[in-house]
Image (cartoon, rainbow, N blue to C red):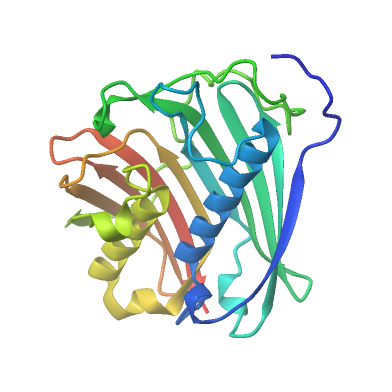
Amino acid sequence: MRLEGVDTPLTDACRHVLGMPHLCPSGLSENWLWKELGHRHWGLIATVFGRAEAGFGPAGEPPVYAAFRRISLQGGDLGSVRENDALEVRSTVTYLSETRVVSRHVAACRDRLVADVEMTSVFVRRQAEGVNRSIARVRVEGRGHIMPAFGGMPVQPSSTDHVFSGAVAAPDERELGTLVVEPCPHLDFNGAGLLYFSSFVAAVDRAEWCFLGKRSGNYATRVRRALFHANVEMGDGLLVRMLASGDEASCCHRALLSTEDDKLLAEIVTRRTTL
């Protein structure tokens, strides 16, 4: 694809007056935020490609989806917002190619940063109808435009994509245990029949609650980074192995999510502090 007709990245902004669907006891619901930003990421892609319907790709062929590969939340201050606050979200496609998309989302309230998020997705398609484990990367050729690169992001996948640089063991890291989570089709899978990326994060939160108990309820997310490798079928269980470090004032942990037959699905690093 060629650079043509696009000089600046596509940007969109919105405003949410926060109510019960947007909140949790510790402030802004991170789970709601991921779903909202995932929807905005998809909408920006559809706008650039001139398509509003679900899926890309030629008519009559299996649809192509934008599956998240990496997500990153920095500068989190989710505990600072309350009911009826106005959350301003500015979203930008910072990089778009035939194989991947990167977007950035800055959420603020009362001119104070709440979250700075970057999301990377790759184009994928099922190689066998209805089989999520057959998902493979594809190229979307000859449609839309390539956006200018943000921060030197390469066009092709990095040779270190299989290495999650955030998952480095801390000196005081200890293993908390492994929790088996059973995803529910009505709650955890999206309209494409795939386990939604936010459900992987939710599984880690369930494991944290299981291993830390009420202590977990006193924390708000400051940093979250995730790298996704594969998807699962409905009925598959998730094994969430959690390793933690930190003290009573903070909670730092990394989680390795896999299938019951040991296929690695995702790696998630989290840093939370007390409210």
- The mark tally for this picture is 0
Left or right of 271? Residue 217 is left
Left or right of 52? Residue 199 is left
> Taking the image as drawn, is residue 56 in sight?
yes
Image coordinates for residue 44, horizontal then vertical, percent: 65, 43
Image coordinates for residue 30, horizontal then vertical, percent: 49, 65
Q: Nearer the viewer, residue 91 or 117?
A: 91
Residue 175 sits above or below residue 260 on the image? below
Residue 46 appears in which quarter of the rendering?
A: top right
Q: Quadrant of the N terminus?
A: top right
Q: Nearer the viewer, residue 259 or 196?
A: 196
Image coordinates for residue 25, horizontal then vertical, percent: 45, 82
* Residue at the farthest bottom position: 83
Q: What residue is at 59 percent from the left and 85 percent from the top?
A: 83
Q: What residue is at 20 percent from the left and 48 percent from the top?
A: 239
Image coordinates for residue 253, horizontal then vertical, percent: 38, 56
> Taking the image as drawn, is residue 170 in sight?
no
Left or right of 175? Residue 171 is right
Q: Nearer the viewer, residue 142 or 74?
A: 142
* Residue at the farthest front position: 60
Q: Nearer the viewer, residue 18 or 112?
A: 18
Q: What residue is at 47 percent from the left and 26 percent from the top?
A: 161
Residue 110 sits above or below residue 48 on the image? below
Q: What residue is at 31 percent from the left and 21 percent from the top?
A: 127
